[in-house]
Structures are given as structure tokens and as C-alpha cells.
């Protein structure tokens, strides 16, 4: 399957979907939703653009992602956006809420809240664009830094100068992890630890590759596949060698580099790339700790990425069966699940020297981001916040 570098359409295309088409949503729903969102929000968001390090094209990226999520949630929870509630007796009352990890400019959170879905977003640094949103939206955008619960348990944090949260969210919260960098691999772990035997569903779009310590790290391709050198041949690697983040031609052979980039446009080539290997690693960890993960190609007006959807099928079955709730776990199930999750965390932290070393690296990085700000406030990001106000096999929306 060939992948283009850019797209003027929005689409979500399942990979290895098998016979699951029967639970999909027809294409016209997401088409209509994207067109409506673009007409309703795009111009105003572009006029109010204040971010200097991001392109205004981010508006269309976030609108397209919002359209995908709205239709995903319609199929999972039976909910509808606010504009449709005026014409129907249905509403989003049953929607359990969302959290957008590393929400950046906050546009996605703004759109989803305006559409009637309760939730919030957090980021390590407050953005200028947050001030352009209504006050009730700003209340749902939090400047907090994530420190994983396993790291908190092995360290004496003291004062680190920043408000933190540890990834504990209310039951059934839907986690969005869009280009969340060091939070990418942590997302399924966070979702599982927050509710060990009834794990939270998630939607992940991988980006920059990081280990659990937050350090730059390129994961090997899946199934033990070879990492290719700049000339396209397998790179020789010794045990313990660092894995280069971005392979470059040693002799200035741009033709060889171009061949590698073209190869990455295929499914097999993508999995050999940095982002592809990160996606495969995230999916592998998620499946190991109990998630049913679906992978898709996500096409937006400016980019093509792989997206991972965790727990959709189980949540859909339980939510619709129980009319707005999920099956209750047992204490034994929870204990066994936590032990399994912690085994995975300890194994993955071993590449950084163990969980304590990884925890210290994470905290040091946190301090460097927020030098000189306040005192630590260790709190669950959602504890004191009141929430305000199966997709098609191939979906394409005219730009």
C-alpha cells in the first residue's frame, strides 16, 4: 500500500481489518461532519491565530481529527454533537469524557467542548492561543506536567517547581494522544494503570520517538526486522549500541536517502521508519497489557500518519449493553493487571538503567522545562475539574 506524503483529503483507513467492516460507520457521516466543522470554525480560528512556531494549517488538521473523533464516539457511545441534539431527543449525556494529552494550542479541546463533549486538555506549557478562547474553554485547559505513577512511587519528588498529575483519570475517560512525543508509549500504560481491569480507551497518533524516561530513542523495527543504513543495506548493530534517531547518508548520497524516503511510503517501509517503529512498539506494549488495538492510516489536509485505537471494540460492546456503563472488575483482576503492567514498565526502563534512573531522567527534564515556577502540586488533573459542557474502512472528505 503506497502512502503519499501529503493529502488534500481527510480519511481514516483501517489496516488488517479483516471482517470487522460490519461495525463501521458509513463514509458520508465523517464527510458531513468535517465539512460542517470547517465551515463553522475554520475562518474564526485562522483570524485569531497567535502561535508563532506553528502554521495556521494546524486549524484544518485539528478540525479533521475532531471529525474523526466525533464519529468514533457516535459509534462507541451512541452520542451526538450539540448541533444535532437540537433536532433529536438524543444527547451527549452518556459520553464519559475525554482528556487530550499534550494538547498544545488547544484547538482540538476547544472544538470538542463547543460540540458538547465534556473533557479537558493539559500541556506542560501554557500556549498563547488559549487566551483567544472563551473563559469556560480556558478553564478546561491545564498547564500541568505528567509524571508517571511508577516514577512517583520510587522517588521523593519534593519541590520541582511545576504542577503535576500522575495519569489517574475518572472511569471510562477517553484518552487522546496526538503527537504527544514522550507520552506516546506511556499512553496505553497510563490508560491501563488508571483503571487496571477496565482499561481506558485511547486514540494515539505517534510522532517523536522517546523511551519511557523521555529520552530520544529509536525503537528497532517490529518482528526483529533490520534497521536500514543510508544506502539501503541492513545496518550492523552490536548489543548495547545506541540506535540513531535519524539515519543520514555518510557520503552525501542524496539519491540513496531519497530511495529510503520513497520506501517509507509503503506499509512495510513505514514500519522500518522511526515513527513506524514507534507505532509498532506502542501497539506491542498495549497488546501485551491487554488492549485490543486497531491501526489505521490517518489522512488529514497536511499529513499522513498511522493512528492506533485501543479498546474500541470492548468499550462499544460493554457501553451499549449496559446503557452507559461498563462491566465491574474484581479486586483480583485489578491486582493481576497491575503486576503485569509493572513488569512491562520495569523491562522497558531497563534500557535507561532501571526504573529509578529512568524516573530521575524524566524529572530532570521536567525541571528544565519549568525552571523557577512555583512549588509542586501533586494532584490528579481531573480530581477537581467538572467537565463542561466503528469508523468506515476508508473515509475521505473533500478539502
Image (tube, rainbow, N blue to C red):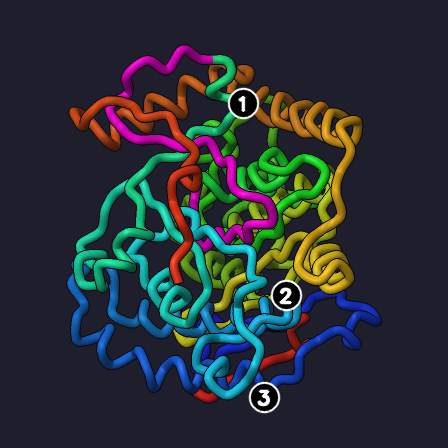
Among the two numbered marks 1 and 2 on one chain, the one whose residue lies closer to the N terminus:
2
At x 22% / y 78%, what residue is drawn? 44
Q: Percent x, y for residue 323? A: 71, 62
Q: In the depicted view, which residue is nearer to us: 29 or 56? A: 29
- Label 3 to label 1: alpha-carbon separation: 44 Å
* Pointer 3 with pointer 1, Cβ within 8 A: no
Mark 1 or 2: in front is 2
> Residue 64, percent across and down?
44, 73
Sooner in the amino-acid sequence: mark 3 or mark 2 = 3
Point out residue 350 in the picture as x, y percentages from the top left corner: 59, 20
Secondary element at tag 1: helix
Residue 150 disc label? 1
What residue span does the magenta drawing correspond to?
155-181
The quadrant where residue 203 appears: bottom right
Would you say the residues marked 1 and 2 are in contact, meaning their CB atoms lie under 8 Å apart?
no
> Percent x, y for residue 223?
74, 44
The residue beneath circle 2 is: 77
The residue that label 3 is drawn on is 28
Taking the view exactly as shown, the residue that stands out farthest to the front is 89
Amino acid at each position: 500500500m503506497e502512502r503519499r506524503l501529503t493529502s488534500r483529503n481527510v480519511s481514516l483507513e483501517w489496516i488488517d481489518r479483516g471482517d470487522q467492516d460490519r461495525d463501521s460507520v458509513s463514509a458520508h457521516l465523517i464527510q458531513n461532519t468535517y465539512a460542517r466543522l470547517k465551515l463553522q470554525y475554520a475562518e474564526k480560528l485562522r483570524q485569531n491565530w497567535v502561535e508563532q512556531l506553528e502554521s495556521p494549517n494546524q486549524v484544518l488538521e485539528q478540525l479533521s481529527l475532531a471529525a474523526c473523533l466525533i464519529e468514533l464516539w457516535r459509534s462507541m457511545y451512541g452520542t451526538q454533537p450539540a448541533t444535532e441534539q437540537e433536532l433529536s431527543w438524543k444527547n451527549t449525556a452518556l459520553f464519559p469524557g475525554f482528556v487530550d494529552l499534550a494538547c498544545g494550542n488547544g484547538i482540538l479541546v476547544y472544538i470538542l467542548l463547543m460540540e458538547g463533549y465534556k473533557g479537558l486538555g493539559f500541556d506542560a506549557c501554557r500556549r498563547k492561543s488559549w487566551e483567544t478562547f472563551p473563559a469556560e474553554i480556558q478553564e478546561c485547559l491545564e498547564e500541568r506536567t505528567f509524571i508517571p505513577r511508577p516514577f512517583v512511587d520510587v522517588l521523593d519528588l519534593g519541590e520541582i517547581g511545576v504542577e503535576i498529575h500522575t495519569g489517574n483519570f475518572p472511569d471510562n475517560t477517553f484518552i487522546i494522544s496526538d503527537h504527544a512525543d514522550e507520552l506516546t508509549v506511556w499512553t496505553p500504560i497510563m490508560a491501563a494503570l488508571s483503571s487496571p481491569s477496565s482499561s481506558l480507551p485511547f486514540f494515539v497518533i505517534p510522532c517523536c520517538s522517546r523511551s519511557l524516561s523521555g529520552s530520544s530513542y529509536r525503537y528497532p523495527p517490529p518482528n526483529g526486522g533490520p534497521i536500514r543504513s543510508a544506502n539501503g543495506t541492513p545496518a550492523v548493530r552490536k548489543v548495547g549500541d545506541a540506535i540513531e534517531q535519524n539515519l543520514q547518508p555518510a557520503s552525501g548520497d542524496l539519491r540513496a536517502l531519497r530511495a529510503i524516503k520513497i520506501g517509507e511510503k509503503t506499509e512495510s517501509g513505514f514500519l522500518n521508519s522511526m515513527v513506524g517503529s514507534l507505532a509498532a512498539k506502542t501497539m506491542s506494549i498495549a497488546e501485551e497489557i491487554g488492549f485490543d488495538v486497531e491501526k489505521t492510516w490517518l489522512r488529514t489536509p497536511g499529513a499522513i500518519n498511522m493512528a492506533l485505537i485501543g479498546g474500541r471494540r470492548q468499550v462499544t460492546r460493554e457501553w451499549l449493553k449496559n446503557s452507559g456503563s461498563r462491566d465491574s472488575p474484581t479486586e483480583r483482576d485489578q491486582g493481576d493487571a497491575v503486576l503485569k503492567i509493572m513488569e512491562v514498565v520495569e523491562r522497558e526502563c531497563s534500557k535507561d538503567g532501571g526504573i529509578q534512573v529512568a524516573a530521575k531522567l524524566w524529572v530532570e527534564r521536567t525541571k528544565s522545562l519549568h525552571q523557577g515556577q512555583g512549588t509542586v502540586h501533586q494532584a490528579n488533573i481531573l480530581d477537581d475539574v467538572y467537565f463542561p459542557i466503528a469508523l468506515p474502512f476508508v473515509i475521505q472528505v473533500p478539502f
